[in-house]
């Protein structure tokens, strides 16, 4: 059972809830605090056999907003039917919530210092402070480029700082990568921040997920498993939260099936509102790994932009997208990389589609208001 308190409620409410819970033998309480960008939300978990405990005793306490009998297995990341308000979080000066769309545009894999610098410079010109930079690359073939690993971290961090990048999404495939990143950031004097990315291939690597949850320094970008159900991915994601780190963004990146051909994966961005409904996590879409190609529609709009649009128009809070200064020379995923000239177009395009999402939201807010007053 979860007792959700009103946002920003005081210690007195918490104490009253804990006192009431203590009437029930064998029940333990655990407090869970979510520090959002606008509010801090506290919850109390009742642990033990809560089936026979009535909810009304808790509901009558002033400052208790709602009592939820938890059926969902993902109890921390779950929204539990509490409507629209966004929780979100802030990291290194960047807000992750549903009020805007963050563009994480960058290199699939770091290759040269010159390319990292060109990418970061283009981001600064475009007014973007977030990027992606793969350093540890999980590749299908052992003979493919595996990423530069820890050796490039010092200059990647330094360049990111030089160009005002506040957060780099960077995949980790092994718990020791967290230590390497932490050490390199410290030695570089923390010029930037890192969001640790769980790749689709590690979506159910529970030991890695637990390790990511046991640290609170870095937020996590969790990519859904490409061959498991959404429910299984949400449960896996809960591992991170249940170990103590609720600062997670859930990323859709397509699922594996030949029925998605000619795309690399079957685009699953219709799940954006589903994840938003079921969880409190901001949702990211990765159109690059979902579509895997750059073909144009008859009007000349790249299909990858349409995929981005599908995510943004349904409420995605973040877009993770591959760029490269010279895609033909990229050592990983060049065929899906946009060019630096396309970066300002992406910014403009995203703003316009986000506007369409805001319009749609207003339409339904208005309809709900009408229905209430009718
Ligand atoms: C990536 O984003 O670099 C990546 C490997 O993606 P995915 O795990 O979704 O395949
Ligand atoms: Mn890639």
Image (tube, rainbow, N blue to C red):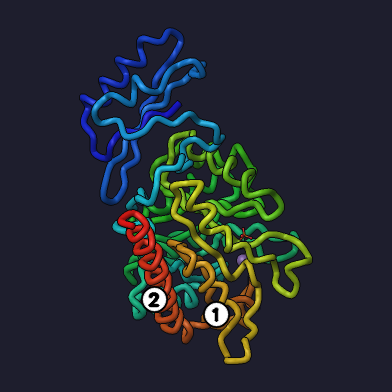
Residue pointed to by mark 1? 338
Residue located farthest toward the bottom when viewing the structure as drawn: 299
Crowd tier of the residue under label 2, counting other residues whose Cα lies within 10 Å: few below 14, some 14–19, many 20 or above: some
Q: Position of residue 131 (x, y in %)?
A: 44, 66
User: Image point 21% across, 31% down: which residue?
Assistant: 10
Residue 66 falls left or right of residue 62:
right
Label 1 neighbourhood size at 10 Å, few (<14), some (14-19), many (20+)? many
Is the residue at mark 1 in contact range of ligand 2, meaning its CB lies under 8 Å from it?
Answer: no
Give SS at disc 2: helix
Q: Which callout, 1 or 2, points to the residue nearer the camera?
A: 2
- Which residue is at the front of the view, 178 or 318? 318
Name the residue at the front extreme. 374
193 w.r.t. 291: above or below? above
Identify the residue shown where x is 42% and y is 69%: 360
Q: Nearer the viewer, residue 147 or 1?
A: 1
Q: In the drawing, does residue 316 fall left or right of residue 304? A: left
Give the label on residue 351, or none. Answer: 2
Q: Quadrant of the N terminus?
A: top left
Tell me: residue 331, above or below residue 339.
above
Asked if one can make out residue 232 in the rendered structure from this viewpoint, the answer is: yes
Under circle 1, the secondary element is: loop
- Location of residue 372 by image quarter: bottom left
Q: Earlier in the sequence, mark 1 or mark 2?
A: 1
């Amino acid at each position: 059972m979860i007792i959700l308190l009103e946002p920003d409620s005081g210690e007195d409410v918490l104490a009253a809830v804990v006192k009431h819970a203590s009437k029930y033998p064998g029940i333990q309480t655990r407090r869970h605090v979510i520090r959002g960008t606008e509010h801090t939300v506290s919850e109390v978990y009742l642990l033990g056999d809560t089936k026979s405990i009535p909810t009304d005793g808790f509901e009558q306490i002033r400052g208790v907003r709602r009592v939820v009998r938890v059926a969902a297995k993902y109890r921390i990341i779950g929204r539990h039917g509490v409507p629209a308000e966004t929780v979100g979080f802030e990291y290194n000066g960047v807000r992750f919530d549903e009020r805007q769309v963050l563009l994480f545009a960058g290199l699939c894999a770091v290759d040269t210092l010159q390319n990292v610098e060109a990418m970061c410079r283009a981001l600064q010109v475009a007014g973007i402070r977030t990027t992606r930079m793969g350093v540890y690359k999980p590749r299908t073939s052992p003979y493919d480029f595996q990423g530069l690993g820890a050796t490039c971290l010092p200059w990647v961090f330094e360049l990111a700082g030089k160009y005002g990048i506040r957060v780099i999404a960077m995949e980790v495939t092994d718990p020791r990568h967290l230590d390497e990143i932490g050490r390199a950031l410290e030695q570089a004097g923390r010029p930037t921040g890192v969001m640790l990315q769980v790749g689709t291939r590690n979506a159910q690597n529970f030991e890695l997920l637990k390790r990511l949850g046991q640290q609170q320094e870095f937020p996590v970008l969790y990519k859904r498993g490409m061959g498991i159900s959404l429910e299984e991915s949400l449960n896996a994601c809960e591992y991170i939260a249940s170990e103590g780190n609720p600062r997670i963004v859930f990323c859709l990146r397509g699922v594996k099936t030949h029925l998605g051909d000619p795309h690399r994966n079957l685009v699953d961005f219709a799940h954006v509102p589903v994840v938003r409904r079921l969880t409190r996590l901001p949702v990211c879409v990765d159109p690059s790994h979902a579509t895997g190609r750059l073909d144009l529609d008859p009007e000349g709009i790249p299909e990858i932009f349409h995929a981005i649009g599908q995510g943004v128009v349904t409420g995605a809070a973040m877009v993770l997208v591959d760029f490269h200064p010279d895609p033909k020379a990229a050592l990983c995923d060049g065929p899906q990389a946009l060019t630096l000239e396309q970066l300002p177009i992406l910014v403009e395009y995203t703003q316009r589609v986000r506007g369409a999402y805001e319009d749609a939201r207003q339409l339904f807010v208005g309809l709900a208001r009408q229905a209430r007053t009718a």
